[in-house]
Image: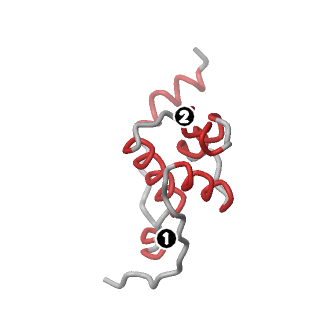
């Protein structure tokens, strides 16, 4: 093990990061996570595998997997196909932000 690696191993546990994010940044929601969670939940409720959903909506299983993992972002077209395959209707709307 190099001296530098040894130094890192010994000292990285002591690093403390101050949370300096503003409240605005912390309050932002992740719409893509929300969409991912809905797709996974609806797929599970429909007792479908990713492969079965992919076959029903004409999207590859790899793309379904990437959407669910968050490594890719869905298009409106792909969301429409997924909604149709799950027997759902895709609804997009703009709503006011919640005020605490």
Percent coordinates x, y for residue 5 in the rendering: 57, 24
Give the number of the disc on residue 25.
1
Q: Residue furthest left?
A: 100
Label 1 crowding class (10 Å Cα cut-off): few <14, some 14-19, many 20+?
Answer: few
Residue 98: image tag: none
What coloring was used for the rendering? secondary structure
Secondary structure found at label 1: helix
Answer with the quarter of the image where residue 65 lies. top right
N-terminal-most mark, 1 or 2: 1
Residue 50 is situated, as x and y percent measured from the top left of the image, at 53, 35
Q: How many marks?
A: 2
The location of residue 55, given as percent across then percent down, is 62, 36
The residue pinned by badge 2 equals 52
Write the residue at 54% across / 34% down.
52
Binning the other alpha carbons within 10 Å of mark 2 as few (below 14), some (14 to 19) or many (20 upward) gives some
> On the image, which quarter does residue 64 sit in?
top right
Residue under the point 61% across and 18% down: 2
Rounded to the nearest whole Å, what is the CA distance between mark 1 and mark 2?
Answer: 38 Å
Which quadrant is home to the N terminus?
Answer: top right
Identify the residue at horizontal 41%, vertical 43% (top origin): 46
Question: What secondary structure is found at the residue carrying circle 2?
Answer: helix
- Give the quadrant of the C terminus: bottom left
């Amino acid at each position: 093990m190099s001296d530098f690696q040894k130094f890192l191993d010994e000292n990285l546990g002591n690093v403390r990061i101050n949370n300096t994010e503003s409240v605005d940044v912390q309050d932002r929601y992740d719409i893509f996570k929300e969409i991912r969670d809905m797709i996974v939940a609806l797929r599970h409720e429909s007792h479908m595998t990713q492969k079965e959903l992919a076959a029903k909506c004409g999207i590859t299983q790899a793309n379904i997997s990437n959407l669910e993992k968050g490594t890719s972002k869905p298009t409106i077209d792909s969301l429409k196909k997924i909604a149709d395959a799950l027997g759902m209707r895709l609804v997009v709307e703009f709503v006011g932000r919640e005020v605490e």
